[in-house]
Each structure stands twice: as C-alpha cells, then as structure tokens.
Amino acid sequence: MPENIPNIDTSLFAHGIKNRLSFIRSRLQLMELEKGEKGAYDSIYRELDGINDSICRLISAPAGAGEKSTFNAKDVIYECVSEKMPQANLNGIKIICRTEDDLTIHAVKSGFRETVINLLQNAIEACPKEGGEIEVAGKTCGGKAEISVSDNGCGISEGNRKNIFKPFFTTKKSGSGIGLYSCRKFAEDSGGELTVAGNRTKGTKVTLILPVSQGRCP
C-alpha cells in the first residue's frame, strides 16, 4: 500500500475520536449558552482544535504536513504558557517567559503550537514539585528564530540523550515516546532543527530553531 494512504483501521479509529470531539464541543457550546458565559471555554476549544488537527494530519497526509502561514510566534508562545500555567502552579513550578516582540515565522501554526505545548509539558514533568522553574525565551539570531524551553529538573543522562529522538523511546512510566520525536519532525519539516543541552545537575534546555519570515503577519 502506498505510504500516503492511511491504514483503514487507523482511519476508522480516528473517525470515532473526531465524532467524540464534535460531541464535546457541542456540549460546551450549549453550556456557554445556558450559563451566559461566552468565551469561558476558549482554551478548551483550542485544545480540541489541536487534537482535531493532529488527527486530520494522521489520516490524510504525511507526518508534518499542513498549511503554512506567517505569524508572530510570540503570540502563540504566550498562549501556550497561559494554558500550562495552572498545571505549573498546581505543582509549585514557576514559568518565566521572555521573547522579542517581533518573532515572525512561516510554518504550520498548529504544529508550532503543539511543539511548544509538548516542550512545556516535558519541562513541567521534569521539574521538582515546589521550587521548579521553567524559562521560555524567544529571539532572532542570524536569520533564525530561536525558541528555547529550559528547566531546573532532573536532566537527561548521556545514555538516554542519544535515544530521545527515537520514536517510542521513553523513560516515563506512562509516556508514549512520541513527543520529542514529533517536535524534531516539525522542526525539520519547517526547515529548522531541534537541539537539546544540559545534564543531570543542570536540568535541560531544548531549543527550537526556525527560519525567520521576511513577510508581515496578516
């Protein structure tokens, strides 16, 4: 079977998930109307849209495919940080975010958002409860946009570092081993790269490097 034709079982499974996502969205919209709380569930809608986009890419296109657009990465980064902040606060973890005002890139926006969310989630899970600290930074350097997520967590051993980008490799009890693999795949599909630095005593710094767009955001 050609590579770009999805497996029928995968398609049926994805179709079932999409139906359930649609039901959840409908129920949320009804709750908004009943309670008069328009906009109360916007963050949940964004998560549902992200899941739906991922499923669409899974069943209809090769990994990393999607429609690219020009946008300010800063806006998406702050949106992602805002959504992960409650989880961080619950675990006593501080998130500091510093980015340049103009961080315009040309990429698949949903893929960029998913990548930042993945990196933040990894950092939160690596940090110690109470006293954990994560720094998110964004800057332009030499025609590239550099978005980094640093944490003061447990770090990555030398033995594991050579395997972290392999699909299904994980050191977490409930991990899928897909997160960092998909992050690097997005970076490469966007004409960039993903680097990892740090050790057991200094935590981890993951940097997403992408080409800077010369165009203006719409």
Image: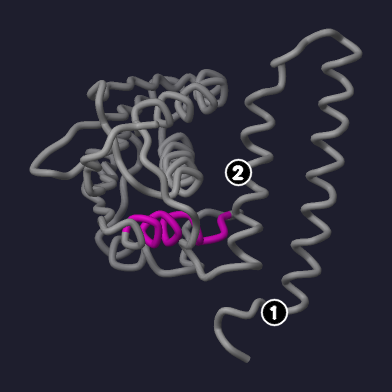
**Residue 19 vertical placement versus 189 (above, below):** above
Q: What main secondary structure does the magenta stretch of the protein show?
A: helix
What residue do we see at 22% from left, 38% from top?
Answer: 202
- Residue at 71%, 22% (x, y): give it: 41
Q: Residues within 10 Å of mark 2 (few under 14, many from 20)?
A: some
Q: Which mark is residue 50?
A: 2
Residue under numbered circle 1: 7
Residue 29, given in percent of the width and then of the height, sits at 83, 25
Q: Is residue 106 above or below residue 24?
A: below
Q: Quadrant of the N terminus?
A: bottom right
Which residue is located at x 48 percent, y 30 percent? 80
Helix, strand, or loop for circle 1? loop
Residue closest to the eye, 92 or 36? 36
Q: Which mark is residue 125?
A: none
Question: Which region is colored magenta?
Answer: 175-187
Report whether 209 appears left or right of 112.
Answer: left
Give residue 172's position: percent from left, percent from top. Answer: 52, 54
Q: Position of residue 33 (x, y in %)?
A: 87, 15
> On the rendered structure, is 172 left or right of 32?
left
195 vs 92: above or below: below
Q: Residues within 10 Å of mark 1 (few under 14, many from 20)?
A: few
- Residue 129 percent across, percent down from the top left: 47, 27
Q: Is residue 208 above or below residue 191?
A: above
Q: How many marks?
A: 2
Q: Residue furthest top?
A: 36
Q: How is the image coloured?
A: one colour
**Earlier residue among tags 1 and 2:** 1
Magenta stretch contains residue 173: no
Q: CA distance from mark 1 to mark 2?
A: 22 Å
